[in-house]
Amino acid sequence: MMKSVTGYNGTYRKIMEMCKSQKPYGTNRKRRKFCRLNKSKSNLKIVRASRQYMYDDSNAEYLDCINSVAHVGHCHPVVVDALSYALSSNVTVCGWEIDHGNLQYTTRLKQTFPSHFDTILFCNSGSEAVDLSVQIAKLYTCGADVVVVDNAFHGSLDSVFPLSRKVSREEVEWVHVIPLPDLYRGTYQSDDPEAVEKYLTDSHEKIGKAQRNGKKIACFIAEPMLTIPGIILPPSTWLQKMYIMIRESGGLCIADEVQTGLGRVGSHFWSFQAQNVVPDIIIIGKPLGNGYPMAAVVTSRDIAAVLGDRIKEYQCTTAMDAVGCAVLDITERDQLMNMASNVGEFLLDQLNNLKKKHEYIGDVRGKGLLFGIEIVWSKHSKKPSQEIAEQIVHRMKEENILLANEGFCRNILMLIPPMCFSIENAMTFTQKLDKALTELPTTNIVNDLITGLPTISVGSETRDVRLGIFQPQEEDEDDITSSLQDNMDQEHAQHCYQDLD
Ligand code: PMP
C-alpha cells in the first residue's frame, strides 16, 4: 500500500516521532561525536550584536534573519540606556501598593489595542503569559479544556507544554487538537474549493466530540498567523469562523502574538487585526522588551476580574516600563511597521521570482517581516526536504546569513528578522539564497554534510543525482517503520532535531 509522504499524517510523522521517542544517547562519547559531526559545521561563537547584525569572535558580520525577539534591533542604544537607568535607579517589588511615580507604559500599550482591552497583566515570559491566560479562561468559563492547532508552540512550562504540539505529541485529555489549515501541505489543499470548510468541519467535529464526552471548552489558543508551524497564513475567514465556533461552545478566544505582534505583519500593529477578529485575550512576549524578559496578557476588566486580588501580582515594573516605552518609541520613530510592510512586499516579489526559477522552492508565503519558504524535492511531488533545507541553511551561514529551517518536517526556511531589516538586506538575502540554490548541485558541502547524516534504509532508494542526497521513496508505512526500527540505533537518533537546537 502506498502512502503519501507529503501529508502531515504520513510517513514523515512516523519517522519524526520515532526519532523523538529515542532514549538519550547513552554514553558521553556518543554525544560528543554527535556534537562534532553536526555542530562543527554550524557552531558560531557570537560575541556581540548590533541592529540586524551579529558578530563572531573573529569579528565576521552575520545578517540575522531569525531573531524576532530583538524587535527593534540587537542592543539598541535607546533600549540599553533606558533599561540600564531603570535598573540602577529603582527595582520594583510586585504585589505591593507602591507609587512608582509616572509610569507610562501600560497606558501607551493599551492605546495600540481596541478600547475594551483595558487591562494588562505583566509577566516575565510568553510561557507564563500563556499559563496565566489559560488560568483566566478556565476561571471565567468554568471549563477545563483547551483547543489548540496542530504543530503550534505556546511555551514550555509544564502547564502549557501539552498545548505546544510542535514539541509535545503526548495525548492529553484536556487538550483538543484541530488541524492546521495548511492549504499547501495539509489534508485539504488549495486545489479543493471546499478546503477551508472541510478544515472547519473537522474542527467542529473534534469540539463536538469533546462536548459529547462531557468536556467543557475553556478556550482556543492560536497565533493569528501561524508562525511556529511554518508561517502558515490562515485562509481568509478561517480564524473568524473558528472564533464563532469556540464562542458557541462557551470558550474564550486567545490570540498568541508573541511572534506576530508590534507591527511585524506590516499592515497592522497586531496580527489579529489583519485577520478581522477580536480575541478575548491577547498574549505578547519577549519582543516587547527587545529580549528583556517581559511579556503580557491583555484583556478586558470584566474577564480579568476572575483573578480577584491576584491582579496586583502582575504589575508593570519600572524596568519593564522603561524598556517597553523605549521599544514603542523606536517602533514609532523609525516607522518600523511601515518598513516591515515595504520590505515585506519587496521580499514577497523577489522570493516569488526565486520560486519560479528553482525547483526546490515549493511555496513562498508571508506578510511583513514574516516569511516561510517551503523546500521540496520537486514542485510536482511536494515532498518536503529537510536535507536540502539544511544544506541551504549551512550555505547561507557560509555567506554570513543566519537562517533557520523549521516546520514539522524541518523543510521550511523561516525568515523573521529584527524589524530594522532593510530593503538592502532583503536584496542581499535573495541574492545569496539564489546563489545557494544554484550552487547546491555542485557544492562539496552537500556531500560532506551527508556523511554526517543518517541514511534511512527503506528498501529501494534513489540517489538524487543533483545533490548526492538519498531521496526517500514513498513506501508502505509499516515497512518503513519496521525497517527504521532495525536501523535506528543511537547514531540515527542523533538526527532528532530537538538535539540540533
Ligand atoms: N508562544 C509563541 C508563539 C512563541 O513563539 C513562544 C516562544 N518562542 C512562546 C509562546 C513562549 O515564549 P517564552 O519563550 O517567552 O516563554
Image (spheres, rainbow, N blue to C red):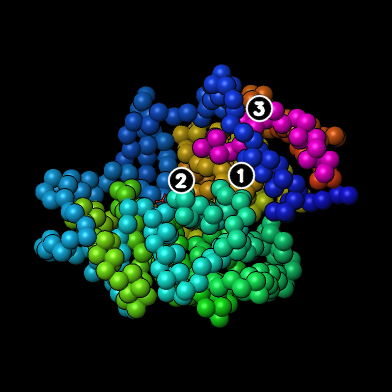
- Give the x, y percent position of residue 266: 42, 63
Q: Residues within 10 Å of mark 1 (few under 14, many from 20)?
A: many
> Is there a contact, CB below 8 Å, between mark 3 and mark 1?
no
Helix, strand or loop for the magenta stretch, by majority: helix
> Is there a contact, CB below 8 Å, between mark 3 and mark 2?
no
In the displayed structure, would residue 138 be above or below residue 125?
A: below
Identify residue type, mark 2. Answer: Ile
What's the magenta region? 478-501
In the displayed structure, would residue 437 be above or below residue 318?
A: above
Q: How far apart are the two marked residues, 2 and 1, measured between alpha carbons?
A: 15 Å
Of labels 3 and 2, earlier in sequence is 2
Residue behind mark 2 = 66
* Mark 3 secondary-structure assignment: helix
Residue 329 circle label:
none
- Give the x, y percent position of residue 205: 68, 72
Q: Quadrant of residue 94?
A: bottom left
Residue behind mark 1 = 410
Instruction: Answer left or right for 76 relative to 350.
Output: left
Residue at image x 56%, y 63%? 174
User: Does residue 462 appear in the picture of this structure?
Assistant: no
Residue 490 circle label:
3
Q: Please identify, in this view, whether the residue under mark 3 or under mark 2 is nearer the observer.
A: 3
Q: Quadrant of residue 229?
A: bottom right
Residue at image x 46%, y 75%? 141
Identify residue type, mark 1. Answer: Arg
Q: Residues within 10 Å of mark 3 (few under 14, many from 20)?
A: some
In the displayed structure, would residue 285 be above or below residue 253?
A: above
